[in-house]
Image: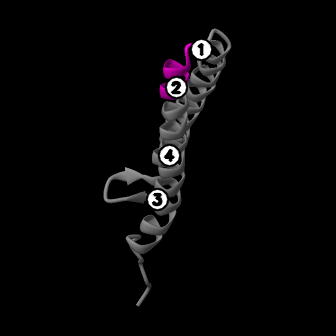
Amino acid sequence: MCTNGVNASQFKTNLEQIDEAVALLRRWTHRSFHAAEDSGSLRTAAKLKDAQGLLDDVRGLLDEAAELIEKESAENSVRVELV
C-alpha cells in the first residue's frame, strides 16, 4: 500500500534487508569474540561481547520499526467511499 508517497511494503522489505546485514555483522562479531577469548585477549573479547549486545538491540529496534510500518500505514491510509 502507498501512503504519503511511500510504499509500505517496499519500506518493510528495506528494513528486512538492513536486519539481514546487521545479523551478518553480529555473526562475525561473535566469531571474533571467540577468537579473542581463545587467544586470551580478554579486554578485546569483552568489547566484542558488548558490541554483540548492541547489535542485538539494533535488530530489536528494526523489528519494532517494521511492526510500526504496518500500523502507521493502516492509520494513514486513504479511504474512498462511493456516495
Q: Are marks 1 and 2 in contact (CB under 8 Å)?
A: yes
| Disc assigned to residue 57 | 4
Residue annotated with mark 1: 36
The residue lying furthest to the top in this view is: 39
Q: Above or below — where is 9 with respect to 13?
A: below
Label 2: how many Cα within 10 Å (few below 14, some 14–19, many 20+)? many
Where disc 3 sits, the SS reads helix
- Left-right relation of 40 to 43: right
Q: Position of residue 58 (x, y in %)?
A: 47, 43
Residue annotated with mark 3: 69
| Disc assigned to residue 48 | 2
CA distance for labels 1 and 4? 22 Å
> Residue at (53%, 39%) from the top-left corner?
53
Q: Above or below — where is 76 with respect to 35?
A: below
Where disc 1 sits, the SS reads helix
Label 4: how many Cα within 10 Å (few below 14, some 14–19, many 20+)? few
